[in-house]
Image (tube, coloured by chain):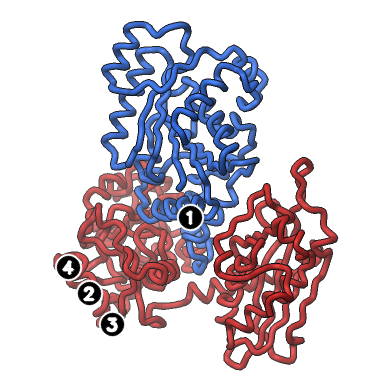
Amino acid sequence: MEGEFHADMGPQYEGEVIRKEDLYIEFGGPKVAHKFELATVKSPDEIENEKVEIIGPDLDDLQPYDEEKGGGSYPIAVLVDVAGGELDKDAEAIIERRIHMFTNMIEGWYHMNQRQDVWMRINKDCYKKGFTSLRELGEIYILLYTSEMSIIESIQVTIITDEKKIEELLPHALEVYAARDERARTLNDEDVDTFYGCVLCQSFAPTHISIITPNRIANCGAINWFDGRAAAKIDPDGPIFAIPKGELIDAIKGEYSGANAIEAEKSLGTYDRVYLYSAFEHPHTSCGCFEAIVYYIPEADAFGVVNRDFKGETVVGETFSHMAGETSGGKQIEGRLGTGLEQLRSPKFIQADGGLARIVWMPKDIKERVKDALEAKGLYDKIATEEDVKNVDELLEFLEKVGHPWIKGEVELPT
Amino acid sequence: MTKTIAMAGKGGVGKTTVAALIVKLLSQKGLVLAVDADPSTNLNQALGLPLDDSQTVGRIREKMTEDVSRGTLSPTIVKQEYLFGKIVESLAESKGFDLIAMGRPEGPGCYCASNRFLRTSLDKLVQDHEYDYIVMDCEAGLEHISRQTTRDIDVLLIMSDPTIRGITAAARMKKLIEELRSNVGKTGLIVNRVKGELSPEIKRAIEESGLEVLALIPEEPDMSDLEMKGKPVTDLPQESPLQSKVKEIVESLSL
C-alpha cells in the first residue's frame, strides 16, 4: 500500500514532535475553541465502506502558520464510523483512542490529547512532499484501522474543518463522552477480576499499600482503576501492579482474598485482612498522602471528613495535620481512614458503616465540591460545616435541628 | 545527551537575566528547554515571551486534582497522559527554545503519585523534544531540585552580588545541594555587578565557602535602560559587557 501516500508510516515516528518552527498548519489545540474526535459503532447499512469525506476547506485551501503573522490554527472534527458483527458501544472509546496512535505513526504528523481537547500538527516538510489533502489522512486511517483491527468490517471517515458544522456537532460528541464516563463510573468491583495495588508511598509508609478498585480510588486521589490498569500495562513490575481479586469473602465490608493476600505481603505480615468498604475492624491502611481523613465522632456515632487544605480545627477540635500525624504511616486505625476525595462519590464508600449518610461534618469547600453527590442523596442540607458549628455540642444540636437521617435512625446498615 | 544547567542565587542578583542570556546563546547551538522554576521572577519576560499564569505546571496539577474530586475529569482518561498533554500545551515555543513555567512547587500535600506523574511527564517532554540543553532558573530554596521533580544537573551556577550577604546565601545553596540526593556535575560561582576589584572581605568569604569563581561580571550600563522600558534582556547589544561575559562563561564550560 505504501507509495500511494505522500508520507511514510510506522511506529518509529510515534515520538516525533513538531515544534512551531517546523509547523505548517495545526488543527485544534489550545488556540482553537471547537475541535473533537469521535468514533461511533453503527450498523453496516449506515456505512459506505472506505468512504472519506472532507467537509470544509482542505489543507491546500488554508493559510499556513506564518512566523511573522502567526495564524495557521484551525478547528477540526474527525469522525470514524465503524461496523462489525462483534463490535459494541464499549469498543468506541478504544477505537477512538487509536486516532492518536495512527496519526502519530505518520511521518510529519503529530497528535496530542483526546476527545474535545484534540490537537494535531503537520510539518512543513510533509506538506512540501505532497501531503496537501486531508483526504489522504482519512485514507491512512482506513488503511491502519482495517489492517490492525480485524474486528472492524466496514469503516468510513469524515474530517470536518468547517467551524460552523463542528460547533453544531460538538454538543452531541460531549453527550457521548459524558455517557461513556457515566458507564465507567458505574463499573463496580463485581464487574472485574483484577484490582491494582500501589506502593509509591512505601518510602514514607513501609506497611502501606493502596488497593485500587473500580469502586475505590487510591488514597491520594490521583490513581483510579483505569489509571492503575494503564500503569500496570506499561510497567507490570513497577510500583503500580495488578492484583488478582480472588474470592469474595464479605460483600458488605468489601473483603477479598486477593486483597488480603497482597496486604499481608506488602505490609510484611503486619496486616493480613483489609475491608475496602468500612472504617471499622480492618480498615484500609493510610499512607501519608491521602487527600482527606474520614474520622469517627463518638458523641454522634457518625463520621466527619476533613481534607488536607482545610487549615482550621475540625468539629472535634483537632486540625487535619494533627489528625494526619496519628492516621498516617501505613497503619490500619479503626475509625480513621485516609482517603481520596473522589471516594465520597463511590457507591461503596464505607457502605458497611452507612455510607455517605453517616457523614455529619465536612469543610464548606468540600461540601461544595461534592454538592451534586450529596444532593442526590438528600444530604446536602443535613451535613454541618465549619460555618454552622464550632464544637460537638453545637454539632449535635445542628443534626437534631436539620433532622440528619443517621441521627433520626433512618439509615439502615446493610446486612 | 541533554545537558542541564541550573541557575541559583538570592533575589536581585541578576540570576534571571543571566539565565535568559544563556538560553539565547545555547539556542544557537541546539534546542533549549528554558525552565522557569522561580515563581518570584519572570524568565519569560527576560526572554520576551508572554506567559499565562494559569499555565504553570503547578497550576495544571492543582486543577487536575480539583477536577477529579469534583467528578468533572473523565475517569477513563489516564491522568499521566492528561497531565502530559496539558504540560505540552503550556509550552511557550520560540526560535531555538521552548519555555515551561513550574509555578509554585507544591501545596501542603505530599502527593507522591502526582509528583511522580509530573516527573514522568517532564522526562517524556525532554525525551520527545530531544532538547540539547535545559536551562533552569531556580528559586533560592531549590524546591524543585529537592522535590526531585527535576533531573540530574550537569552544571550548577550560583549567582551573587559583591556583598557578604550574597556570598553567604550562595554558600548556603552549595551546602543545600550537597545534602540533597541530586547528582550535580560541576558547581561554580558567578559574581555580578562587580565594580573594579572584589574587597578582601568578599574574597575571604568566597574562599571560606569553597566555591569556585567562574566569572566576575561588571556592572552593565545598558541594563537599567532595558528594565525601565520593559524590554527583554536578550535585546542587549552583542558586545555589551554582560553579553560578552556570559559568552565567556558558556565557552569555558564547554557545553
From this view, report whether residue A66 is shown above or below residue A169: above
Q: Is residue A185 visible?
A: yes
Question: Whole-Å distance between the Cαs marked 3 and 1?
Answer: 36 Å
Q: Secondary structure at mark 1?
A: helix
Residue B233: x and y, percent?
Answer: 61, 25
Q: Amino acid at mark 4?
A: Tyr
Q: Chain of mark 1?
A: B
> Which quadrant of the view contains residue A352?
bottom left
Q: Chain of mark 2?
A: A
Question: Whole-Å distance between the Cαs marked 3 and 2?
Answer: 9 Å
Label placed on residue A102: none
> Where is mark 1, residue-wise?
B124
User: First in sequence: mark 3 or mark 2?
Assistant: 3
Observer-nearest of B173 and B22: B22
Residues flagged by tags 3 and 2 on a common chain: yes
Residue B2: x and y, percent?
Answer: 46, 46
Q: What quarter of the picture does the N terminus of chain A occupy? A: bottom right
Look at chain B in the picture and name its colour: blue
